[in-house]
């Protein structure tokens, strides 16, 4: 599985966990277990994002150059 798909799956699961903790009546143990899973997913997502930023930096020599190019191509002005 590539990083994009696994990131999106992990992020979706993180959102599900957040919603569940916020909206459902859970026992303390259930809440703690979901929180721990969420922390692991958050760390995983953060690692993937960090790798993407570093890859962009290595390819472009500038963290924001690809973002600037995108906005230049897609802006109204």
Image (cartoon, rainbow, N blue to C red):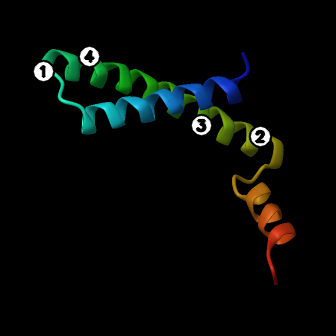
- Residue 23's place in the image compared with 40, above or below, is below
> Which residue in the protein does label 4 denote?
33
Nearer mark to the viewer, of 3 and 1: 1
Nearer mark to the viewer, of 4 and 3: 4
Locate residue 51, reporting x and y percent.
64, 32
Badge 4 vs badge 2, beta-carbon distance below 8 Å: no
The Cα–Cα distance between marks 4 and 3, rounded to whole angstroms, is 24 Å
Residue at point 69%, 52% (across, down): 63
> Which residue in the protein does label 2 denote?
58
Residue at point 24%, 32% (across, down): 24
Nearest the eye: 73 or 47: 73
Locate residue 55, reporting x and y percent.
73, 37
Per the rendering, the mark at residue 28 is 1
Helix or strand or loop: what does disc 4 sit on? helix
The Cα–Cα distance between marks 2 and 3, rounded to whole angstroms, is 14 Å
Nearer mark to the viewer, of 4 and 2: 4
Badge 4 vs badge 3, beta-carbon distance below 8 Å: no
Locate residue 65, reporting x and y percent.
77, 58
The Cα–Cα distance between marks 4 and 2, rounded to whole angstroms, is 38 Å
Q: Mark 3 vs mark 1: which is more N-terminal? A: 1
* Residue farthest toward the front in the current orientation of the protein: 24
């Amino acid at each position: 599985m590539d990083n994009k798909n696994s990131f999106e799956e992990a992020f979706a699961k993180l959102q599900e966990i957040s919603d569940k903790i916020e909206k459902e009546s859970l026992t303390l143990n259930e809440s703690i277990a979901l929180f721990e899973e969420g922390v692991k997913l958050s760390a995983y997502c953060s690692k993937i994002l960090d790798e993407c930023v570093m890859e962009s930096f290595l390819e472009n020599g500038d963290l924001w150059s690809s973002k600037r190019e995108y906005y230049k191509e897609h802006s109204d002005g």
